[in-house]
Amino acid sequence: MPGVTSDSGEFNSLSIVPHSLETQTPRVYPLRTRRAAPPFGRVSISWARGNTLRVSLLQPEGADSDGEVVEVNLTNAEGGEIPEAQRRRIAYGSVTPFALLQSRKNPMDELQYDKTWWVHVMEYSNEIKSLLGASKSYITPTIEDPKALLKDVEEPTSLKAAWELMELFYADKQSQTWIPERLLDWLADFDCLLSATQPTFHARLVSFQKALVTIQEVENYPEYWEVMSSALAVGWLDIVVKMLRLHGSYQLDQLGTREIESGLVEAVALLISQMPRLRPHISDEKLGECYSTKPEFMKAWEKWRTQITKLDCHPYWLQCDHKQTRVGLKNMIQIMLGNANVLSNATYHWIELYISHLLYIRPFTVGLESMYTLAQKCMHLKPITNQHKLMGLLIGILEENTEVVLAECSRSFGPWMITHAVELLTAGSAQAEMLLHEEQSKIGGICIEELHRLIYAQILSSHALTWNIAPIYLTSCMKQGLGLLENLLYKQPVQHHQVLLKSIEICRLNGIDYVSRHMMKIAGVHYWKHGKKGSAVFWLQQAQDEVRLNRIAKHLFDFVGKSVSDESFKQWEGMIELLGTESKTAGGLEFLKRYRDFRRSLQQVQDGITTDDARKTSEALISLMKNPSTPQQFWLHLLYDSLRLLNWKDHPLLNVSQTNLLLNKLQELSLARLLPGYVDADLPPEAFKSVRRALATNLGRAILEE
Amino acid sequence: MEHNPPQVHKFPQDSYVDALRWLPQLSTFSRHVLLASYDSETSTPSLQTLTFSPSETAPSLTPQASAPAPSRITSLKISPSPLSPSRALIASATFSGSLLFLSADLINGSLDLEFSLPELGFHSGPVSAIDLNDSGSECVSVGEDGCVNLVSLSVSKGFRRVYDSKGLVSYSSVKWASPVEFVTGAFGFGLHWWDQRKPGGPVALFKDDWTKGSASGIVHSIDIHSSRKHTCVAGGSSGVVFAWDIRRPKQPVMLSGVGIGNAPAYSAVESDIWEVHYDNYTHSSKMSSSSSSTILPAMICSEDGILAVIEQGEEPTELLAEPCAINNFDIDRENPSDVICSLEWESLAILTRRRA
């Protein structure tokens, strides 16, 4: 099974993502410090995000600085075929097409699914393809250099080559009838990738192109004829015709003397450009005549072959004096007639031989089975010691072995490829769909498709810039996705305000409010610990975490100035604003607001007000004292500050039961004072007494009044 | 209504863009942009100037000069020097709590550090926002630590603490209203109006009574129009954009927002609004119809990838809808039809608006 390690009792069997323990030569990573310098007192190393190590360097006492924390990236510096930034760009770009395709899966019914699904998949595939590199743009220069056989185009990547291979075999239903021709186009685009490690015709053509600039009378060079035969064999007809036109007999001064020769060259060129092709269309610069149905193509093919045979037996050959031309052209005719030996000599790589067989010997080949048999034969004829990764994938596809295709995809092209290419695979093969969607007990009941998505999401999560696209992939995983999404979100650094807000937004989009509440709690506690009390209260309030709000309220109250005359209370205004309206959870902090309001009205009492307002203030005092959330350490302050209310001269403001309530509170307080751990209020020593006296007087006056 | 879709050009970057600004314009053919970017591969933050050559078909953005930054940039502000237009004063606040002042020479292509305020004693923890005043002589900074500092750029370079909330309030944004007044934004959609002539604390507070107990939020960005110094427009969580007139402190005007109080019928976005600026371009196109009591049109960018212009009582005009967040944007002062914005997915977009 690809991507899954055997259950052999090693520690590897516990990990979802397999990794090899191959011994590698150790690498040295320099630490780039800004402040700290050796010697270090202590060094501690831990994992940071992804492939980064966090190294904490603590300096011994007396050093210039305390130390420093640096991060070391363990990623291979040399990188692969595609640079990291480009890789991230591909990852970003594939999010939208992937999400769109997933959203289209749900509402589709069975019948429609079979008919139109591949159209959606092709749309998706085209979007992805455009990310993997610009499609070859043929900008024809106004003055074309007749000797320029190859166009200067950007080097394609093997990732793109692999994607196109998957697309043409699985997703593109329109190409099913002309796969050999599609494969020919594919090789024309990507033969250069094979050149790096293996002999190919492309490499030969490149070297000939260089030599061509200096060559005069090209037809005298055997290389010219060889390259032309090879180009014909792999079906690059436009190059062949272009090269034929370089033949010396076309020169103006030679026209008269080399008429026969020129006629033969032209006849061959004409035949080549009229070659029947079993394909619906062909791009302008390519040659051949297209036939989309088989009977039509067969008829044209027979006719074309008859013409070649006729030319082959023509008496003009005897009159052709130029030996190289005669031999060369005859050789090309043999290629067109499908002479297996000549084809084998003209090609380098087995895939080139394969294409030539499909073109000239078995143009009617259909079905993967017969294509596979032919491929095996060609590989046998042109054996290669080290197989290119693209060829491994191609063979897997041809032998219809989904496991091999999956394994090659993931081994050679990485998690991005397999996660996204699975969509092509399932669209094209019922067998693959079953294999990918079947729940596997070996990997905890998830299916292979999900496994690969999870792996890819893990990789995205490990990078600071791609973590926030991982949720798109995780939410498409039915079984483990949500759990891993929670993990990912909880691990985000809350001290980065923006990251926290972005994480909360992800929760909102996915309807996982409980996760965002947890994150808000984590943030609240973090800010509290770092002395940012306002932010802490805000986040805990957003999380509706009454328990923690109550707990921090206790600590906060110790800092609140308790006397009305205390000016420092003003700085609490900002925090109180934060607590907002009544209905919002504020926990024990609710007291702060009532206390603020009470202080305000008390302030007015000091400034002298009417009895009515004083009564209102005393009502507020009672409700404050009644409220269980009013902390005990404020009681005496509240009462002492309200002495003027208790001693209101016109008539008592409090009735008997209210006065009794306050007396009870005072009693409770005097008992609490006896307990150990009671912190005495910073009030004058007679405060307690004067409050008691005032309350007693008030009680007497109230009884008389009633 | 603007019916012509803007011309959009995207420029992929190989690093995350933390902040960006247009630099003063030298000529119509070459424009300059300031970027604060973060290279994730080397973990290095930096500031750089780029030259933008506008063109219908193939505009280009090429790096000009760069300077290292000690930590990631949280806020960037520019002030053109009135004496030499080719030089611009740049203030940039960092995540580690320092403040850098640089000067960019656009002709010779250099970017030099003039002076900086070290982390110690200035702000503890990230500087949330800064603002340079019009003359470029003073810079106000606010932080998560609850400090409001005023940096003088005149002869004696140094800072003075205007206020220290001791962590009871964390500030998230700031904007000058006049040479002596500024507005700060905070958690709980709070706005504070400060007047340097009245020290000791904010002179006016605005609180979110209109949320009616539902979710509260944070003000991420504030803007004040030079022609209406008493009104500020603020944008923040849950797609909320509101205008607050200091003369009518109890009556905010809601411009956008979802499920909050007296929110208008149409809302451009539901997620965080990262930045808000008055849009002079839309304003000037309908100068005649606007009375002094209506709120001027403003542009916003959001976490859900929207760049839009919102106007009081009208449906928002979407300029850009991206699959990823738009974290910052800036409208060119001299050429308000041009907007630059940074996308979450390591890329920049430059928009050119055309009249219908």
Image (spheres, rainbow, N blue to C red):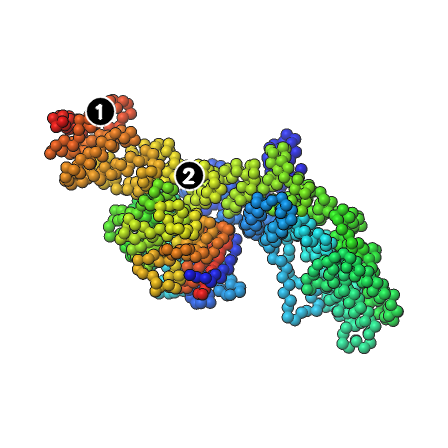
Residue drawn at (47%, 62%), measured in percent from left and top? B4
Q: Earlier in the sequence, mark 2 or mark 1?
A: 2
Q: Chain of mark 1?
A: A
User: Which structural element holds mark 2?
Assistant: helix
Front residue of A175 and A404: A175
The residue under label 1 is: A664
Q: In whole angstroms, how far apart are the C-alphas of marks 2 and 1? A: 41 Å
In the rendered structure, the answer to whether residue B197 lies left or right of residue A78 reads: left
Residue A558 falls in which quadrant of the image? top left
Contact, CB < 8 Å: mark 2 with mark 1?
A: no
The residue under label 2 is: A520
The mark lying in front, picked from 2 and 1, is: 1
Residue drawn at (11%, 26%), measured in percent from left and top? A704
- Other-residue count near label 2 (Cα within 10 Å), few / some / many at <14 / 14–19 / ≥20: many
Quadrant assignment for the N terminus of chain A: top right
In the rendered structure, the answer to whether residue A320 lies left or right of residue A166 reads: right
